[in-house]
Image (cartoon, rainbow, N blue to C red):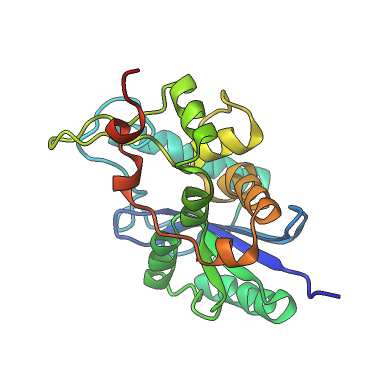
Amino acid sequence: MAKKDFFLIVDTETTMSDMVADFGAVVCDRNGKVYTSCSVLIHGIYNDRKNHELFHDKKLVDSSLWAKNNLESRYTKYDGMLESGRRMVATNVAINRWLDKVKEKYNPYLTAYNLAFDAGKCENTDIDLAQFTKRFCLWYAAFDKYATTKRYRQFILDHHLFKNPTKLGNMSYITNAEVMTRYVTNQPFLEDEPHTAIEDVLGYELPILVDIVKKSKKERWLNPRPFDWRKIQVKDWFTPK
């Protein structure tokens, strides 16, 4: 009997100091069954708002998620999670103890939607993901599996999922976790990610992973072609008839 595959899906919400404030992770199997999870706000980072403000765009002064004006409501949301028990404050040392146990018990494949980003921020925060040598980027796997297929491109067209043109005139269509989740679950009007770590994992990244591993050979999802914006240019795929 083949050895069962387990997956460690990680997501982070970060700070202006390039560290992790909100860490979320689950261990699951290829059917999406969750065996254990971790959802914590990092002691010394989340509660040090002077030196480690949540990531935001200083240039945005509207009510959008990443605007500086929205910082207080994001903190209020997290504080509410602490009060309700949906989050706890823990040190990076405690997270590493959990990760050590995960490695020993499950020896999972590490993944994240933009693994390089999350792994880098975890390294900055002394969260040890380096021990997970079996790894792949879920964004790359989704891009490789779906992004240039006729069905995905029709989904993009039907729901107007295009980026704004750049100054150089390049215009791509979207391949982020929100759009990929809407595509694989056939829920085109699924609400946007809340951009809180464990909720993003469970509601968005987990369904993408399950769809990919069920419909692809391991060799492909474990070694996907990297994201390449040149491969998803609107001018190359959507032309007048």
Please, is residue 134 above or below residue 67 in the view?
below
**Depth check: 80 or 212 in front?**
212
Residue 164 on image: x %, y %: 26, 29
Q: Residue most toward the right?
A: 1
Residue 193 visible? The answer is no
Rendering quarter of residue 36: bottom right
**Depth check: 178 or 230 in front?**
230
Question: Which residue is depicted at the point 31% across and 32% down?
Answer: 234
Image quarter of the N terminus: bottom right
Question: Which residue is depicted at the point 24% across and 32% down?
Answer: 60
Residue 165 visible? The answer is yes
Question: Which residue is depicted at the point 30% across and 35% down?
Answer: 236
Rendering quarter of residue 117: bottom left
**Depth check: 79 or 210 in front?**
210
Image quarter of the C terminus: top left
Please, is residue 98 above or below residue 87 in the view?
below
Residue 177 on image: x %, y %: 50, 43
Relative to 142, 171 lies left or right: left
Residue 169 on image: x %, y %: 16, 33
**Depth check: 140 or 240 in front?**
240
Rendering quarter of residue 203: top right
Q: Residue most toward the front?
A: 241
Relative to 55, 178 lies left or right: right
Residue 240 on image: x %, y %: 31, 19
